Amino acid sequence: MKKCVFVLLFVITFTTVFAASGPVYSAERVYYYGDADMDGQITGKDAFLILRHVARLEIMSGDNEKISDANLNGTVDALDALQVLKTVAKIVSPKVFTQKSQNDPANSTARVEINGNLDVPESGLRNYKEFSSVIVQTINYYKKYISTLGTKIDLYIDNATQDSGWTPVTTPVFRKFVIIKLGIRENDPQVKIAFQFAHELMHYAFYEKYGINKTFADVREESICTAASLIYIKDSFPMEFQSYVEYVKNLENEGYRKGAEVAEKVNYDFRQLVKMM
Ligand SMILES: [Ca+2]
Ligand SMILES: [Ca+2]
Ligand SMILES: [Zn+2]
């Protein structure tokens, strides 16, 4: 009985942490626009702070000021406080804000953003919370090995399952930014989101390394991207690893199939894989 209570307490604590902090995911670096005090949660207090800033009672600066532009129109005014209140009321979805790291010389203005419409109750993705949390966890994992990831080219992450061509896919748009479109359905498990996104994120890493005008992904790139997915699954979803290896080995596409070999060749060491890029 005691054990039961303990487990329940743990579950409650765990879920509360997730629910309350919303987009924690990347710890220090990813926030949502509107989170004026940058505590990881969008609350009425943020609207209050924005209004105090507008009234010049308490001026914000730096990232706090930037993040306070909740409607992203370039200025902080009362409409941003309204936008925050709408977010609190779940009428609108906040946009992801990536904080620039102070000690990263390679830093630029590149932004990583997830399509906020996916978080709309009726028309969005029912498992959006899992979707966005897997995405940010995957990005954080990659950043351990590719420290400059997400600093050169803006990345827009979306999901589409109908009438939108092949998914998952990574596409450069206007030679300016990259869009990753996943094909996740509402009942898909986290590991599937992770497998798809990890592969596409590696393509994005190729774009950042070789430039947005690089040639189309060849067999070698595909094999490295697939290997990246497998290594990530091995580290983050070890229980599912074997079934994904089997899955990959039986795929028709040569590049995907070779991914299993490549992952094995680098001893499932992501650092070694990055050197192959
Ligand atoms: Ca806040
Ligand atoms: Ca604004
Ligand atoms: Zn691919």
Image: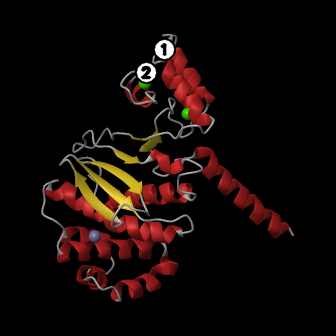
Q: Residues within 10 Å of mark 2 (few under 14, many from 20)?
A: many
Across and down, in percent, residue 134 comes to 48, 60
Report the front residue among 27 and 91.
91
Query: Is residue 24 visible to the viewer in this orientation of the structure?
Result: no
Q: Residue at x 46, y 18 (%)?
A: 77
Placement of 165 over or under 230, stated as above or below? above
The quadrant of the picture occupied by the C terminus is bottom left
Q: Quadrant of ligand 3?
A: bottom left
Instruction: Name the residue tied to disc 1.
Output: 54
How far is the residue under mark 2 from the one under mark 1?
7 Å
**Residue 187 screen position, x and y as percent:** 57, 68
Residue that badge 2 annotates: 76
Q: Which mark is residue 19?
A: none
Above or below, comparing residue 58 to residue 239 in the picture: above
Q: Residue at x 42, y 59 (%)?
A: 160
Q: Nearer the viewer, residue 175 or 155?
A: 175
Pointer 2 residue Cβ closer than 8 Å to ligand 2: yes
Element marked by disc 2: loop
